Image: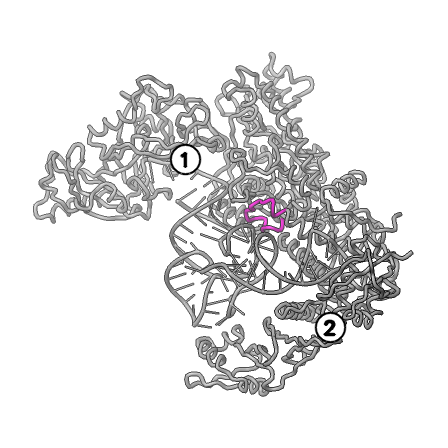
Amino acid sequence: MSVKYREYSGLNLPSIEQEILAKWNEQQAFEKSVSLRDGAESFVFYEGPPSANGMPGIHHVISRTLKDLVCRYKTMQGFQVKRKGGWDTHGLPVELGVEKELGITKEDIGKKISVEEYNQKCREAVLRFKDKWDDLTRKMGYWVDLNDPYITFKNEYIETLWYLLKQLYNRGLLYKSVSIQPYSPAAGTGLSSHELNQPGTYKDVKDTSATVLFKALHNEKSIFLFEALSKAVASAPTGIEPAETEPAEVFLMAWTTTPWTLPSNLGLTVGGNIDYALVQTFNPYTHLPVNVVIAKALISKYFKAEGENGDLENYTAETKLLPWKTLAEFKGSQLDGLEYEQLLPFESNSLEKIQEITPGATPFKVMVGDFVTTEDGTGIVHTAPAFGADDYKVGKKNNIGILTLVDREGKFIEGTGEFSGRYVKDYKDEKDYVDVNVDISVKLKKENRAFKVEKYEHNYPHCWRTDKPVLYYPLDAWFIKTTALRDRMVELNKTIHWKPKSTGEGRFGNWLENMVDWNLSRSRFWGTPLPIWSTEDGADMKCIGSVEELNTEIKKASEVLGGDVNKHYLHDGILDLHKPYVDEVVLVSDSGKPMHREPDLIDVWFDSGAMPYAQWGLNYEKLKAGDPHPFNQPFDTNFPASFICEGVDQTRGWFYTLHAIAALLFDSVAFKTVVSNGLVLDKNGNKMSKRLGNVVDPFATIETFGADATRWYLITNASPWDNLKFDIDGIKEVQRKFFGTLYNTYQFFALYANVDGFTYSEAKIPVAERPEIDRWIISSLNTLVKDVTRAMDDYEPTQAGRLIEDFVDEHLSNWYVRLCRRRFWKGEYEADKIAAYQTLFECLETVVRLMAPVAPFFSDAVFRNLNEVASRYNLQSVHHVLFPEADETLIDQQLEERMQLAQDISSLILSLRKKVNIKVRQPLHKVLIPVLNPAMKAQLEKVEELIKSEVNIKEVEYLVDTEGFIKKKIKPNFVALGKKLGAKMKAVSGALAAFTQENISELERNGAVELDIDGEKVSILLNEVDISSEDIPGWTVANKGALTVALDITITEDLKQEGDAREFVNRVQKIRKDSDFDVTDRITVQIDTNPTLKNSLTTYKDYICAEILADALEFSPISAGGTEIEVNEHKLYTIVTKKG
RNA sequence: AGAUCCGUAGCUCAGCCUGGUUAGAGCACUACACUGAUAAUGUAGGGGUCACCAGUUCAAAUCUGGUCGGGUCUACCA
C-alpha cells in the first residue's frame, strides 16, 4: 500500500476522470453503491425515458446531472436507490425519421413498403444512437442501470400497457368518440399536434371572410328584442313605419373566415358577460333596413362614429355614411336559447337529416360559451360543430347536433345545392379553381344575409407535407375519461412537492383544472396497438389485457369461426404485439360474430406514463390471484417514486401522463417530488437549434473541460428551473476558481504531509485541544455541512454548490491554509503540526464528500488519494461512504464571528498600508482599535495573534471609550424602531442625526434618552440605535461597518532592520525556488559587504537562518558569480549554495 | 389568447419569501501589492434611476396592481 499521498503535476480534470471511470468500471462501483444498501430503505427514482433516435445534447446533461446528484446524495444518506434506465421507442418522431430516410410518405406505407418492413425499420432506427447515449451517460458520470433498461417496444412492456388499458376499459374510462382534429384533405390524413408544430406550417394567408346575418325568430325568447324595436320606433318623432308587408327583422351578426362552414352551421355562441347592442341600420349591399345584434365593443369595427344617430329616414343607396342607432343593450346571457332561421338550407342539412344523425338535436339557437372574445368579429360566433374544437364542445353541451357537409377529400357532399361536389379550398391545384367561399358570400349578399365581405389576412395552419391548408375535421378517436377524476387529480397534485412550486400550482395545477379527456388515438404504424376488438356494427367489443388472454381468444375465435381464421397464431400464439400482426388477428364476440381490431395505435405518452408499472412487467400469478398490482417485483417497494426530474416541457407531457394513470387506476400519486428544470439556451439567450448552429456538443465539452466542471457549472450557475445561458467561459471559470483552488489545497496538503509522513495514524486530537484557527475552520465546516444538507434536502443543489464553493475559496484556502502555511513547514512533527494536518485532512475529506453528488469524479479522486494513505474507511469510493453529518457541538457561533472580525480588520489594515505605501513585509509597531463594548474586546483579544501575524504588526491596542478621543456616530436601528415609532420615524431619525458626542455618551451611560418629537416625549433605548466609531483624531483610519482601525505608521530603526531582514529572506527564498532546491535542503549563504544592510542582517541573523535553512551568513566580498538582489532599494550580491 | 418563469454593474448571478436608509459577489477592465499553494492571491478604482408606471407604507429592489421586453408550455379560435 502506498504511504504517500498522490501528487499531481498539474490539474487535468479530463484525465483524472478517465482514471476514475476505469476504476469505477473495474470495481463495479455503481453496482456496489446499490448493493451496499441492500435492506436499507428505498429511495425511488424513475428515469424518464429518452428517445435514442437522436443525438444527445447539452440540455440532456443538465437534467441528468440533477437526477444523478439527487440519487447519489440519497445513496450517501443511506438509502438504496435503484435506477432502472429506459428507452422511449415509439412515436411520431421515430416514424418521421424513418419516412425521411426511406424517402416515403405516410401514404406509401402498406403500398411501397409493407407495414411489417416499415416497422422493422422503425425498430432498427429507434436505438440507433443508443451507443452514443450510453457513452454520454458514462462520460458525464450519470449512474443509471444501462444493463437492464425497460424498452417500450418490447412485448412485456406493451402487455402491461394492455393490462392497464383494460382496467380503464372495465371501469368505463376508455371510450370511443368523435373529436375534432387537424386534418389534411390533400394528404387524406389527420395530423398530430406535433406535425402542426413543424416549422413553417402556420402561414399568413388571405381568405374571404364574411360577416353574415342570422335572422332571429320572433317568439318569447326574443321578445325583448322586438319590444325594444317597437318602443324605439314608437318614441321616434317620425319613425320608420313597420310596414304590414315587411315586418321588422332582427339579425344576429356573426363573422367567419371559412364561409364554407356556413352550410354546416348549427348554432351561434355568445359570451355570457359580454355586452351586446341592438343596432338599427341598413344592409350596405341591399340597402334594406336591418336591425342587428353585435357586441357593443365591436360596433366601431362596423360602424363609423359619425354615423351614429344619423339620418335613418333619408338613407338611400347613394348615402356614403351608413347611419346607425343603438336601440337596446343587454348581456350575452340574455340571448341564451334564442332561436334563428337556418342560413343556408339544403336537403342535406334539413332538420330531419340533423336529427337523423343526432336524435333529439335542437339546432339553430344561441348558446353561451367561455371562448368568445371581443378581439375580432362581432362577438357572436358562428358555430359549426364539425369544424372546430370549441364549436364541437359547446355544440355538444347544448345538443345542437353535428353536420359534416364536407367529405374527407375536402369537397361538399351531395345535397348541398349548387355547392355540391366543390372543393372548399384548392386542394387539387385545379387550373380554374373558383373559390367556393366567394360564391357562398355572393349568394348571401344577394339574399340580404351578408353585412360585410372582405379579404382577411390571418395566420392559418397548413399541412407540412402538401402545403395545403388544414381543416378541422371530426374523426373517430378513443379517449380516456380523465375528466371523471379531475377533482381527485387536483387533490392528489396538492400533495406533490414541486420544484419550483409555481410549476405545480400554476402551470400544472391550471392544466388539471382545465383538463379535457385524453385523446389516445393515433393513426400511425409504429406504436402500441389499442387492444380492442369490435364487431363490424360496433355493438360488441372486447378489450384484451394480456398476451395469454389474447392467445386464448385467438384459439376460441378459430374454433368458433373456423376456416383460416388466425391460423398463423394458433401454434405459438402471438409473438409480436405490433402491427401488422395484431391486425391479422380476428376474435369472436359472445354472439359469435367476428371482431376486428380497432385500427388505432395509442399515444406514445401513454407508454411513458405507464412506466412505473410496465418497466417491471406483468406477473401472471398475481394477475390470477386478483392482485390489484399484478406487476413483477420490485414494484411494491418502487411505487410511487420519491423523486423524478425532467425539463419543464414535460409538465404537460410525462408529468401529466404519470399523474393521470396513477390517479385513475391506483388512486395514488406517481411521484412525491418532482423537479422540473429549465431550458439550456446559448450564451445570447437563444434556444439551441441545429438550424442556428448554436448547439453545444456535450462530448466535446466534457472532453475539454471535464464532466465535473461542466456539471458544477450547470448546477451552480443558475437555479435548475431558471433557463441557463450556456457559456463555455463559465465552465472555464468554475474549473479555475473552484476546482483549481481545491486542487491547490489538496496539493499543498499532500506536499507537506508526504514530507512529514502524516498518515492520520496518530490518535485524533480532540478539537477542543486544537488551536483557535483549527476550531474555527472546523466550526465553519460543520456549519457548512448543516447548510448544504438543508439545501440538498430541499432540492436546492444550486445553493448547496455555492455554499461549498464559498467555503473552499474564502475560508479554507484563503484564510485557513494561508494563515497556517507556517505550521506545515516549520517546526517539529508534534501536537500543533499534527493538529494542523488532522484539521486540513478532515476539511478536505468532508468537502469531498459534500461535493461528491455534484462532482463525482474529482471528489472520488481526492477521496481515494486521502483514503489510500489514511485508510479511514474500509470502502473504495466516496460514493459508498455516508454523507457528512454536522456535529453541532463543534459549531461555535462566537468563534465564527470573531474570525470574521479578524478578517475584516486585516483587510482594513492592508488597505491602510496600501494607502500609505508600506508593504506588508515591513513590520509596524501597532494598530489601534476602538472597542465599543467589553464583549467586542473579548472577541478581539482571542484573534489578536492572527491579526498581528497576518498583517505584520507588533501590537494591538484597544481604545476603550475615553471621551473625545474616539469620534462616534449614531444611527437609528430601523428594524427595531420602525415598529415602535411608525410615522414618527422620520423625525426621530433627524433628531439622532443631530446628536452631539455628548448626547451619544449620555445615551451610552444611561441606556436611554428622551427625545421631544412634535411635543411628544419619545424614549429611545440603547439597543434601538447603532453606535459606531468613525474617527480617531490625528490618525489615519479605515472603517467597515461598526469597525474602525488606526495604524501607527512610524518606522523605527529597529522595525526598519527587521523589515530588511524579512525582505532578504524573501529574496533568498526566491533564489532557492529558482534553483529548484528541495524545501528541506539546507544552504550556505555568502553575502557581499554592504554597510547599510549588514547591520540589519546581523541583528536578525538567527531569524534569517531559521527561515532559509542556513547555518550561518557569511559576509565577504563577491567578485564574480553572485546573484544581484535588491533589498529595500539597496543592491546586494549573494551566493546561495546547496549544502552537501 | 391563456398559464408560467425571468428582467439588479459590460457579462453570470445573490438579495425579494419575512420591507429598514451606503444594493452585494464573481468574471472582465485599470493600478498597486504579495509570493516556499504561484496557470494562485490581496487591496483599491471605475461601473446601477434594481425594466417601466402607479399604489400601500414613516420607509419599496423587496409587498400589490398594471405596462413593456424575453423564454417556455398549452391553445389556435369565429
Check whether the beta carbons of the residues at disc 2 and disc 1 lie within 8 A of each other: no
The front one of A116 and A1041 is A1041
Residue A465 location (% of width, % of height) = 46, 24
Number of numbered labels in the structure image? 2
Q: Residue furthest front?
A: A1119
Residue A997 appears in the figure: yes
Residue A537 location (% of width, % of height) = 48, 22
- Asked if residue A885 lies in the magenta stretch, the reply is no
Q: Quadrant of the C terminus of chain A?
A: bottom right
Q: Amino acid at mark 1?
A: Ala
- Asked if residue A719 lies in the magenta stretch, the reply is yes
Q: Amino acid at mark 2?
A: Lys
Disc 2: CA contacts within 10 A as few (<14), some (14-19) or many (>=20): some
Report the residue marked by disc 2.
Answer: A1056
Disc 1: CA contacts within 10 A as few (<14), some (14-19) or many (>=20): some
- Answer with the quarter of the image where residue A353 lies: top left
Residue A869 location (% of width, % of height) = 85, 52
Residue A888 appears in the figure: no
- Residue A100: give its label: none
The residue shown at (65%, 27%) is: A547
- Is B11 left, or right, of A807 in this rendering? left
Which callout, 2 or 1, points at the residue further toward the start of the chain? 1
Do dots 2 and 1 share one subunit? yes
Report the residue marked by disc 1.
Answer: A389
The front one of B33 and A776 is B33
* Disc 1 element: helix
Q: Residue furthest left?
A: A238
Q: Which residues are magenta?
A: A715-731
* Disc 2 element: helix
